[in-house]
Amino acid sequence: MQTSTRNELLLERSRCAVWHPCTQMKQHETLPLVPIARAKGCWLYDFDGHRYLDAISSWWVNLFGHGDRRINTALAAQLETLEHVMLAGFTHEPVVLLSERLSRLTGGALGHCFYGSDGASAVEIALKMSFHYWRNAGMPGKTGFASLAGSYHGETLGALSVTNVALFKDVYAPLVRASARLPSPDWRQAEAGESPRDFAIRCADALARHLEAHHAETAALIVEPLVQGASGMAMYDAEYLRRARALCDRYGVHLIADEIMTGFGRTGTFFAHAQAGITPDFLCLSKGLTGGYLPLSAVLTRDEIYDAFYDDEISRGFLHSHSYTGNALACRAALATLDIFEHERVIEANQTKAAALQAAAREIAQHPRTRHFRNTGMIWAFEVDDDNPGFARRFFERALRHELLLRPIGNTVYFMPPYVISAEEIELLTGRTVEILGQV
Ligand SMILES: Cc1ncc(COP(=O)(O)O)c(C=O)c1O
């Protein structure tokens, strides 16, 4: 069969059989799906050999490129011994090793690791654990949660309750429990002359007022440290996290760090919260955890929290589960990912790469149509002046024609490339983005 026919057939079958995520399916009448036959490094290929530079790491999961030899080898070896066993009542080496290593990466401050399968399930786990901790600790009135304006923590009902993106939340409002929404320290909202740090302090003052009034009924504050991804790569000063930590300590409220997007070096340090010199009470991880290979999430907690569940009474335990909790293959992919970090000084190498991309993107930053060009670690974002509706879709389509996978959020275009992006690929990404800015 000719390859272009294979492309077309797959698209048609996909439209007939697959309900694609985060999509108004009718749009695919005019916006074709992109068939992917294989992938290698930063590139995705269709059956005809058309290629697309995966400049958003396949929804922010991929770290070391597609088809990484080291992760492939580790997975193949794991397949020969154990693919999966239920984790209730059983254990296995990959999950123990992974839990030990993740804990070490928090300096041992977060001693136990609970597993889920996706980011949203990690958020559900952290919310439930926080609530249940307070109940076990004799404070059953602490049932509320607080999150930031523009926060995104996933699409399941609990996660949606602390998500503040209208497009995803409003339809389901009758199903979703209310939570407190606090000002985001997103520095784009600072007043003229106000530094990102000063604005962060102003937002932390609002948090202080909220917790002073509501700490007795608040279980936890949940934040995306340093970068709020899904609402448009809002970036903020680490001072907010320092103050939030101090306020949560003062008022007896848990701090949940949702590092599902920001973890694993994305913001320039292994975990984003490290840039504030703080430790959260709960740390949610997913996406890059397996290098972008397999669905796995983890919630790490302080031992004091774990101890509050450790009891003769069954119902004081955390009776939450997912069938694939601690899947051995996914844990092995995660271990291979951590090996790469350990052996290859990834964080240092990323600094050089980030400097190169920043320099290559100078024309974008200075382009007359762009605003708020910003960067944290291996994330870049900017807004494009364009009042016509459908900007994101038009930009996405045009980018595909330029061999780029870019998926703007509203008028925000962002780059979140795999860490293996080369100097030539950086030039291609930034150069072609400038071309697209002149066309869309
Ligand atoms: C910060 C954050 N939390 C939670 C999630 C939800 O993760 P998942 O899509 O794996 O459920 C995401 C996904 O983009 C995210 O960016």
Image (cartoon, rainbow, N blue to C red):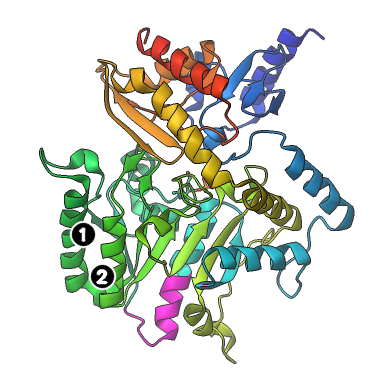
Taking 321 as reference, is 220 left or right?
left
CA distance separating discs 2 and 1: 9 Å
Determine the residue positioned at 71% across, 8% down: 4
Taking 208 as reference, is 90 left or right?
right
- Of helix, strand and loop, which mostly describes the magenta segment? helix
Numbered badge on residue 305: none
Look at mark 2 in the image and give the residue it sits on.
247
Q: Quadrant of the N terminus?
A: top right
| Amino acid type for the residue under numbered disc 1 | Ala
| Amino acid type for the residue under numbered disc 2 | Leu
Query: How dense is the environment of label 1, judged by Cα within 10 Å: few (below 14), some, or many (20 and up)?
Result: many
Q: Picture coordinates of residue 121 (x, y %)? A: 54, 57
Count the labels in the image: 2
Q: Nearer the viewer, residue 38 or 86?
A: 38
Q: Quadrant of residue 87?
A: bottom right
Name the N-terminal-most of marks 2 and 1: 1
Extent of the magenta region: 129-141
Cβ–Cβ under 8 Å for marks 2 and 1: yes
Determine the residue positioned at 61% across, 23% down: 15
Q: Which element carries disc 2, helix, strand or loop?
A: helix
Compared to 57, does 10 lie above or below? above
Q: Nearer the viewer, residue 42 or 440?
A: 42
Q: Which element carries disc 1, helix, strand or loop?
A: helix
Q: Picture coordinates of residue 419 (x, y %)? A: 56, 36
Compared to 61, does 24 lie above or below? above
Determine the residue positioned at 34% across, 17% down: 363
Numbered badge on residue 204: 1
Q: Is residue 24 visible?
A: yes
